[in-house]
Image (cartoon, rainbow, N blue to C red):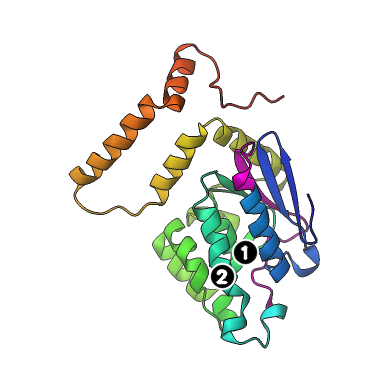
């Protein structure tokens, strides 16, 4: 499937959504938001898809909201109204979502990758929260950026709007793996393989646990978590995984590479 600003391919359990609008630096235009939303919905509904990858063509990963479309619009007409749903879809996706960042990411583009589970960046990738420098606030993206980043790093970088490199992004928690530009494909493939080795339902529940906000006495939390753990040990997936481990064979959900 292809669109004007996004291309989608599905192969061997991986849906690759490629931002493909280099003329406007892969900005989050009206068309890009709509096509990304539709592609994500389709990938999450496709039982053959195990992992989703966000990639890009051109030099820039994503420059953020399309400022040409934002110019002159009233508050109620701004495209940011559609952005929370997009970020929330990625954040709460039961399937792992991985971002491959090969170049600059700015503002909303940083929010897009921050909502992902795993971010692989090339050494030449750069990042920046440019909002304050053009008189706007990184409000929407803060919901996914702040939980991901080291707090003091997020504080400084969102306030200064400074451009920072991949090493700084990794140190601040925004990026998971930094590799040579020529090694991005191999690193992405390695992470996809590792993610696909996990059982689908167990991955979805583990992601829910990682995203959940927990409070209250530890004993009360253990009461809930104990029930969850016991159910999965006894589940069809759990029993298959245990059997595969004991029999020294791949579990039934592990892609064969055919």
Give the answer, above or below, for where 255 lies relative to 57: above
Where is residue 257 shown, x and y percent of the image?
69, 26
SS for dot 1: helix
Which residue is pictured at 51% across the width and 32% down the height?
Answer: 198
**Residue 11 in picture, x, y percent from top left:** 72, 37
- Residue 195: give x, y in percent of width and height: 55, 36
From this viewpoint, which residue is outermost toward the top? 247
Residue highlighted by disc 2:
129
In the rendered structure, find residue 135 and report the number of the disc placed on it. Answer: none
**In front here: 104 or 139?**
139
Q: Nearer the viewer, residue 246 or 226?
A: 226
Foreground: 142 or 243? 243
Residue 109 — which label?
1
Residue at figure coordinates x 48%, y 36% from the top left = 201
- Is 145 situated left or right of 25 in this image? left
Q: Name the secondary structure under disc 2.
A: loop
Mark 2 neighbour density, 10 Å: few (under 14) some (14–19) many (20 or more): many
Nearest the viewer among 235 and 51 is 235
Q: For the point 49% across and 54% down, which residue is it?
A: 171
Q: Is residue 125 visible?
A: no
Q: Nearer the viewer, mark 1 or mark 2?
A: 1
Residue 251 rendering spot, x and y as whole percentages: 53, 21
Which residues are the magenta region? 43-67
């Amino acid at each position: 499937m292809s669109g004007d600003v996004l291309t989608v391919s599905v192969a061997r359990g991986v849906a690759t959504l490629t931002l493909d609008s280099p003329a406007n630096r892969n900005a989050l235009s009206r068309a890009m938001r709509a096509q990304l939303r539709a592609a994500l919905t389709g990938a999450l509904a496709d039982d053959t898809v195990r992992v989703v990858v966000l990639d890009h063509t051109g030099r820039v990963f994503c420059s953020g909201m399309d400022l040409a479309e934002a110019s002159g619009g009233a508050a109620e007409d701004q495209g940011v109204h559609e952005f929370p749903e997009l970020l929330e879809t990625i954040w709460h996706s039961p399937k792992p979502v991985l971002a491959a960042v090969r170049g600059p990411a700015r503002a909303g583009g940083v929010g897009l990758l921050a909502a992902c589970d795993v971010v692989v960046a090339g050494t030449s990738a750069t990042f920046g929260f440019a909002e304050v420098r053009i008189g706007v606030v990184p409000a929407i993206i803060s919901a996914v950026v702040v939980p991901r980043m080291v707090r003091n790093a997020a504080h400084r970088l969102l306030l200064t709007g400074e451009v920072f490199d991949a090493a700084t992004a990794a140190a601040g928690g925004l990026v998971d793996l930094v590799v040579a530009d020529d090694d991005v494909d191999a690193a992405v493939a390695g992470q996809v393989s590792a993610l696909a080795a996990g059982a689908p339902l167990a991955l979805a529940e583990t992601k829910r646990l990682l995203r959940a906000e927990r409070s209250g006495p530890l004993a009360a939390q253990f009461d809930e978590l104990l029930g969850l753990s016991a159910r999965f040990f006894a589940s069809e997936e759990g029993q298959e995984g245990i059997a595969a481990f004991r029999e020294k064979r791949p579990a039934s959900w592990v892609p064969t590479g055919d």
